[in-house]
Image (cartoon, grey):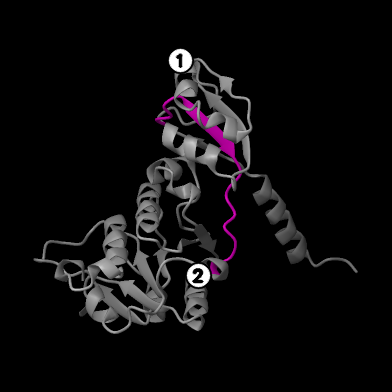
Amino acid sequence: MKKPQWVIEKERARRVSAQETIWLFGLHAVRDALLNPRRKRLRLVVTANAAEKLADAIPAGGLEPEISDPRKFAAPLDPESVHQGAALEVKPLDWGSLRDAALSEGPGPARLVLLDRVTDPHNVGAILRSSEVFGARAVVGVERHAAPETGSLAKAASGALERQPYIRVRNLSDAMEELRDMGFLLLGLAGEAELTIGEALEGRRDRPVAFVLGAEGPGLRDKTRATCDQLVRIGAAGSFGSLNVSNAAAVALYAASPESVGSKASS
C-alpha cells in the first residue's frame, strides 16, 4: 500500500533533521562538547594556541584536530563569532522526550523551565546555566519561534548545553497539559499577578513545578496564560520594571528551592 503524502513528508523531514550539523565555538563550549559522551562530533578546527589549551580534552573527542591559521580560520563561522581559536562541528543533542525528562531522577521535587517563544540565544543560554545550578530537570522550548541549538547559544550557556537537557516541543500548551497529567503545578510568571512565587508554593513545595516564562515584551501568550494553574510574580522592593527573562528564571528556580524557605527576598 502506498504511503500517504503526509507520512512521506514527515519521514523526509526527519531524515533532513538527522543530517543537520551545528558548529560550536569558543574554548568552554568546545571543551565541554569534546568531553560529552552524548555528543556526536564530526570535525575539530583549532589554532595551535587553542590546541594547547584544549590538550586535556582533545583525546576524549576522538577526532584528529585540524590546525588552522588564526588569520584564516578554516571553520565556516560568522566573521563576528568570538571563537577563541576553537570550533567543533557536531550533531544536535537528543535529550529524549519531555516525559522522560520530567520523570527523571534528581534531588528534590522536579523543577522545569518552560519558555514561551523566547528566541534570544543569549537568554536561553543563561537560563540553561541557571537551570543546571538549581537542579532543574530540563528547559523546554517550542520547535518554532524559539532559540535553536546553535554555537551562539552554546557559548552563552558556557558548557551547560552539554549537561542540561534542552527539549523542544511542537505545542507548548499541549506539553503543559501533559505535565499537569503527571502532577506538575504550572506557574506562569507575570508582573501583574497577585501572588508571589513563595506565596503560591506555600504548602506545595513537595510538588513538581514547571515555571512558564514568556519573551521580554510580549510576555506569555493568551493560551499559555489560560493553561497555567496560577500566575505568579517575583516579589520586589519597589515598582521599577521587570527582570530580564534569564534573571527571572534564576530567581524563580531559587524561590522554589529548599534554601529559599523563609527568605522574603526570594519569593
The prevailing secondary structure element of the residues shown in magenta is loop
> Image point 29% across, 70% down: which residue?
258
Classify mark 1: residues with Cα within 10 Å, few (<14), some (14-19) or many (20+): few
Residue in the foreground of this view, choosing between 215 and 107 = 107
Picture quarter with the N terminus: bottom right
Q: Judge from the rendering whether residue 188 lies leftward or rightward of residue 152; answer left or right.
A: left
Q: Position of residue 225 (x, y in %)?
A: 36, 76
Residue in the foreground of this view, choosing between 76 and 57 = 57
Vertical order, 233 against 160 (above or below): below
Amino acid type at circle 2 is Ala
Whether residue 193 is visible: no
Query: Which SS class for mark 2?
Result: helix
Disc number at residue 102? 2
Q: Distance of mark 2 from mark 1, alpha carbons?
A: 46 Å
Magenta stretch: includes residue 126: no
Report the span colored magenta. 81-98
Q: Judge from the rendering whether residue 41 lies leftward or rightward of residue 203; answer left or right.
A: right
Disc number at residue 200? none
Query: Which SS class for mark 1?
Result: helix
> Image point 59% across, 24% down: which residue?
65
Magenta stretch: includes residue 91: yes
The residue carrying mark 1 is: 71
| Residue 114 position by quadrant | bottom left
Q: Position of residue 230 (x, y in %)?
A: 32, 81
Classify mark 2: residues with Cα within 10 Å, few (<14), some (14-19) or many (20+): many
Residue that protrudes farthest toward the right in the picture: 1
Residue in the foreground of this view, choosing between 209 and 73 = 209
The numbered mark, 2 or 1, whose residue comes first in the sequence reads 1
Amino acid type at circle 1 is Arg
Picture quarter with the C terminus: bottom left
> Image point 21% across, 74% down: which residue?
192
